[in-house]
Image (cartoon, rainbow, N blue to C red):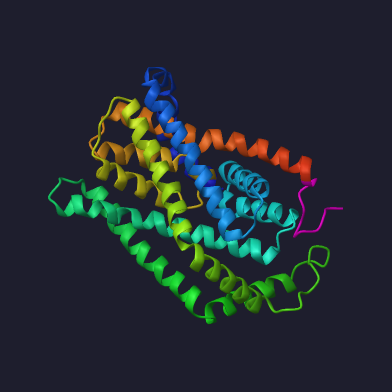
Amino acid sequence: MVAGIALYVLMPALVKVLSSWPRLLHLQVGWLVAGLAGEFASFVCAMALLRLVLRTPSWFAVVTAGMAGNAVTNTLPGGDAVGASVQYRMLAGTGIDTVQAASGLAVSSIIGVSALFALPVFALPVILGGTAVSPGLVHAGELGAVGFVLLVAFGVTALSTDRLLLVVGRALQWVIDHLPSRVRRTQPDQPMGERLIAERDAVREDLGRNWWKAVLLVAGRIGLDFFSLIAMLEAAGTHPHPALVLLAYSATAVLALLPLTPGGLGIVEASLSGLLILADVPSANAVVATLAFRIGSYWLPTAVGAGCYVLYRRRYGALRTNGVPRG
């Protein structure tokens, strides 16, 4: 119901963006190819980061589960939760420990979201330097700064103390204990809170040795995604101020985290095109650049995710529930 109402409200903006598809034929081919290549490289960095935090050598398991989970996120209401569930079950089906899979997905998500909230910081020198900035973009930067501080506080607490994970572990254990017997797994030898702490320590130790890899990969994932947007704007014949586009990009990425529509459908189109206009991009160019950007970041990866799920089924069989084969 929420997704339906949100799409109804956002439909005019979504239709406006989608109806600009004939203008795609007039984009500069070189910049269009560069934008799509940047988006492809961004997804490679995302899969490499997930492989790092999962501590697994298997590219096949990570890529098929990651892309299939992303496709579910992009197509179902409440897709973030459902996509994460599918991704978790697919990883468990490859033999990866369930707690290891859950903690790895959580760490990857926290790192990515923290980086998104930190993006407006890189635009501060331009704002403080006297460049005229729309109040809407300034507010977006302020939102990102506040969110970044809160996420850093949460991350520091989770990494440095056990109390938070023990509380989360007790809550998870309560949920597991109240699941139907046909779904519940056998009770683990170790309480859930202690297992989470053990996995946290393992992830912290690995990232301690490989922190520079995690930084490079998350920077590559977001930086190449942002480059893709810049390339699409150039393909449309626009040469915007990168710092202003960065504010528009980061604000849209934060809004897309709200699980109102599948994959932020409509939210991204409405907010990104509108904020690009505030960043002094001509309206027509903002709309067609948004469409080209979404083709590379939403539509094509969704199709690839469906193919990845088929490949997963061929190697590992039917999707499993909590690591146990169905039926």
Q: Tell me what residue is drawn at x 42 percent, y 60 percent.
A: 114
Q: Is residue 282 above or below residue 135?
A: above
Report the front residue among 247 and 46.
46
Q: Is residue 308 above or below residue 237?
A: below
Q: Position of residue 40 (x, y in %)?
A: 50, 37
Residue 189 lies left or right of residue 297; in this view the side is right
Q: Tell me what residue is drawn at x 82 percent, y 54 percent.
A: 325
Q: Quadrant of residue 267?
A: top left
Residue 190 lies left or right of residue 166; in this view the side is right
Q: Tell me what residue is drawn at x 54 percent, y 71 percent.
A: 205
Magenta-span inclusion, residue 322: yes
Q: Quadrant of residue 85?
A: bottom right
Q: Tell me what residue is drawn at x 26 percent, y 33 percent.
A: 281
Magenta-span inclusion, residue 42: no
Q: Position of residue 107 (x, y in %)?
A: 53, 62
Region in magenta: 316-327
Outermost residue, left direction? 130
**In this figure, what is the number of numbered marks?**
0
